[in-house]
Image: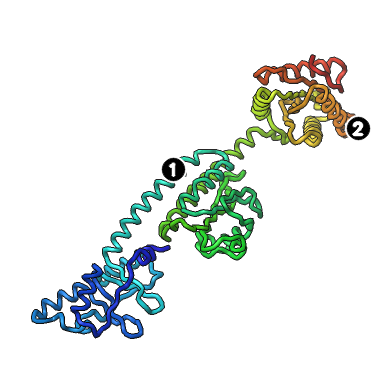
Amino acid sequence: MSGIDLLVNRGCAVVTVSPGEQVAQAACVMAERNIGSVVVVDQAGGIVGILSERDILRHLARLPGGPLQSRVEEIMTASVVSCPRTARLEEVNRLMMDKNIRYLPVVEDGKPVAVISSRDVMARQLDMVKEMRDAAEEMAKLLKCLKTLSVEEVLDVAVSELPHIFRAERLAIGLREGEEPSLVRRCNCPCREEDSLIRDLEAQGSFIRQPVPEHCQRQGCHGDRILIPLTVTVKGNAPDSVAPSAGFLCLCGWGSLEKPSGELLAYKAVKAQDILGATFSNAIRFHQTHRRSITDALTGLWTRRALQERLQEEVERALRYDVPFCLAFLDVDHLKSINDSAGHAAGDEILRGLANVLSTNVRATDCVCRYGGDEFVVLLPHTHLPEAHIVIDRLRAHAQSRLSLPNGRVVTISGGVAQWNGQTQGEDILAQADLALYEAKHAGRNGVAVAS
């Protein structure tokens, strides 16, 4: 709803008189209605003039004898300046200032529907200033709530706060990776046509305000919708490269809520677009940086740092729910001699092959990481020691059957397994598994030892 629509809808109904009425009758109508002007219309309802207080006072000054017996058409302003209902408030204000007029009829389908005064415009402008200030405060609160480095948390905050900020009952927000939306959150939104939102934004390229599409109408949505594109930019590998990722914010369903004016919606849309785009970009950059810091470059497995975080989480879960977990140390037998005889490239290939064997033969809930050098760790949640021993020995057998050097030499691994002993520090189970691995080495390698 535009600013002029708000003026028309808030009781600024048009009052009309005919050209042949006496000025006295028109003045009485103006006094009874407490208005400063009336629109003069012909029998067909078309505007032929406007009669204002200024016209009556000017006529009184010119004809002091009995001027109120004159007819309206004799003193009205015949050259009427009007505006369509679709005009924006700033256009109305500029027109009134340029023409030096205080009353402006609003015309729809050739008929007057309201009269706007300069006082109405000024009051609406003051209201808009307050609305903009309130909107700025709401956006500042939103920005404060978005002090997070998690993409999922940003989406959750947006779903929680934006419907109130935009006075909308339904919302959908999402980010796209590749060609499909991959992260989507909704608030009272039954629509699942996210790909159509992406297509609409790609076709328009900017803020869209339009009637809800047919597939949304079939889900019970009516009226119009606001569709805001979100651009997330993340630096690539090259210093100056940027990889944009498309996202969307869709709002509709004003229902019983008072819909903001078009100017206010546009202001909020731009602010939300800037805030969400920047916040998503920062969150994704942080996630990528953190992921690189906990991912081993050679094998693609988690690093020792990631294991420490996951191990502490597992200790806390075991303490809270009294469930066991086990941990195993694994390493390649005689890796130094492999590097010396076949070269470090062959040694690296063995490490990558072992990483693949471990990661593809464990449960989704298990954690595999490269601890350092040729040492690997497998974390087994909700697992007792006898079960863990079977699992790790099976991994040892898989490795023996799949790892070999170009000359045909079979490569084996050794392992040590320990079960959490109820201590609050994860380092205890690491030390126990490491001692068990030491025992497996001394027992002849290519085996798995269990911590006592």
> Residue 318: in sight, yes or no?
yes
Tell me the CA gap for discs 2 and 1: 66 Å
Number of numbered discs on residues: 2
Q: Secondary structure at mark 1?
A: helix
Proximity of marks 2 and 1: CB atoms separated by less than 8 Å? no
Name the residue rendered at 52%, 56% in the picture.
251
Q: How was the colour assigned to the protein in this rendering?
A: rainbow
Residue 385 screen position, x and y as percent: 80, 22
Q: Quadrant of residue 54?
A: bottom left
Name which residue lies at 61% across and 35% down: 290
Q: Position of residue 149 (x, y in %)?
A: 55, 38
Q: Crowding at label 1, few (<14), some or many (≥20) Cα neighbours within 10 Å?
A: few
Is 120 on the left-hand or right-hand side of 234? Answer: left
Say few, some or many: other residues with alpha carbon within 10 Å of mark 2 (under 14 / 14 to 19 / 20 or more). few
166 shown above or below 28:
above
Residue 377's disc number: none
Callout 2, which amino acid?
Gly
> Looking at this view, is 237 or 90 the one in front?
90
Q: Residue at x 83, y 29 (%)?
A: 395
Q: Give how far across and how far down residue 323 sits, in percent.
A: 72, 24
Disc 2 or disc 1, which is closer to the eye? 1
The answer to whether residue 20 is above or below residue 431 is below
Q: Nearer the viewer, residue 261 or 374?
A: 261
Q: Along the polypeptide, which appears first: circle 2 or circle 1?
A: 1
Three-letter residue code for mark 1: Lys
Residue at the spot 51% in from the left edge and 63% down from the top edge: 224
Marker disc for residue 141: 1
Which residue position is annotated with label 2? 408
Rendering quarter of residue 287: top right
